[in-house]
Amino acid sequence: MPAFDLPLTELEHYRPDVEEPADFDAFWLNTLKEAGQTDPLVSVRPVQTGLRLTRTWDVTFRGFAGDPVRAWFSRPAGAGELLPAVVEFAGYGRGRGLPHERLTWVNAGYAHLLMDNRGQGDQYGCGGETPDPHATAPGGPGAAVRGLLAPEDYHYRRLITDAVRAVSAVRELPGVDAGRTVAVGNSQGGGLALAVAGLVPDLAGVLVSAPLLCGIRRALDLTDAGPYGEIAAYLSVHRGAEQSAYRTLSYVEGVSFARRAQAPAHFGVGLRDAVCPPSGAYAAFNRYGELAGARSVKDLHAYPFNGHEGGDAVHVRRQLDWVAGVLAP
């Protein structure tokens, strides 16, 4: 994929205005208040994985509307002290998969919670186990368009609420230092991590790479790949539904969450990313923390010749180094 978005010199100063609903804060306050009326944890069950150096539990917690959401929770075997926690969110179309698939963070010495994506898991990886019982509102078959015509019905209202509740859940698990919790994700997971940073004021840090749901309106004009392509395809059939869709999408816009975030942040972006165009990531980064009342600590690494994979393992190493610094006693 050739470079197609703004030049790097423009991206570095790109701070677009965002059409933010007047009731954005009230919408999320009420949504999370309703979800928080019950304790998050439902069950924590140890599982055998065949891994001698890692202990894993099958966790169920209450997400949006109290719905049960599955997750894998892992710790280094033999670690007796309280550990910082890394809450990871998976990409679009993925579920939590199998417990031995994602071992980077637990091998680095952290407690690790990997959240399942409700109503997803059938496109990549090894599947998911969390249904979405509310996916009956008008919209297409893909998660990105379920309930697209009303913010109250939209899939990402439920998924973002699940992500916030995942942080509440990990903080109640044994052996976790609740005051040192980091959110991390790539692509859809990056968008979820950014939303969590905007809704949970006491995160210790957030790692965002190739984030979905950032600069949504511009992304719909730039690409027909991935989830944005599903939205465009839906609107190509449902002519005249654009304004309802745009209104719904404004409640899950990552730049709006970024403006409210307070935690130290680390971003990664491939400048040839046709799935999540880089201008969205830069918009979120450049406006990150502007409503927090203090200058936010934030870093961004750009990869000029990479697409949606970004810096791949090189970037993960940078993330490990950065988190170690943020979580140092």
Image: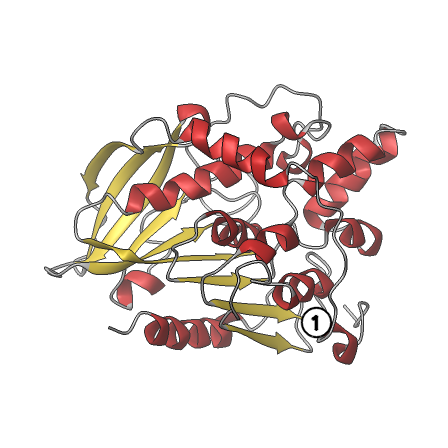
Reading the image, the residue beneath label 1 is: 271
User: Which residue shows up at 31% across the image and 69% down it?
Assistant: 327
- The residue closer to the viewer here, 160 or 118, is 160
The answer to whether residue 221 is above or below residue 241 is: below
Q: Tell me if residue 303 can be seen.
A: yes
Q: Tag 1: Cα neighbours inside 10 Å, few (<14), some, or many (≥20)?
A: many
Query: Can you give x and y, in whole percent of width and height, for residue 210 in the image?
Result: 60, 61
Q: Amino acid at mark 1?
A: Leu
Q: Is residue 127 visible?
A: no
91 vs 80: above or below: above
Q: Eyeballing the image, is 232 above or below 147?
A: below
Image location of residue 135, percent across then percent down: 58, 23
Quadrant assignment for the N terminus: bottom right
| 173 left or right of 297 in image | left
Above or below, 16 relative to 72: below
Q: Outermost residue, bottom direction?
A: 9
In this rendering, position of residue 107 left or right of residue 292: left
Q: Quadrant of the C terminus?
A: bottom left
Q: Does dot 1 land on a helix, a strand or a loop? A: loop
- Counting labels gives 1
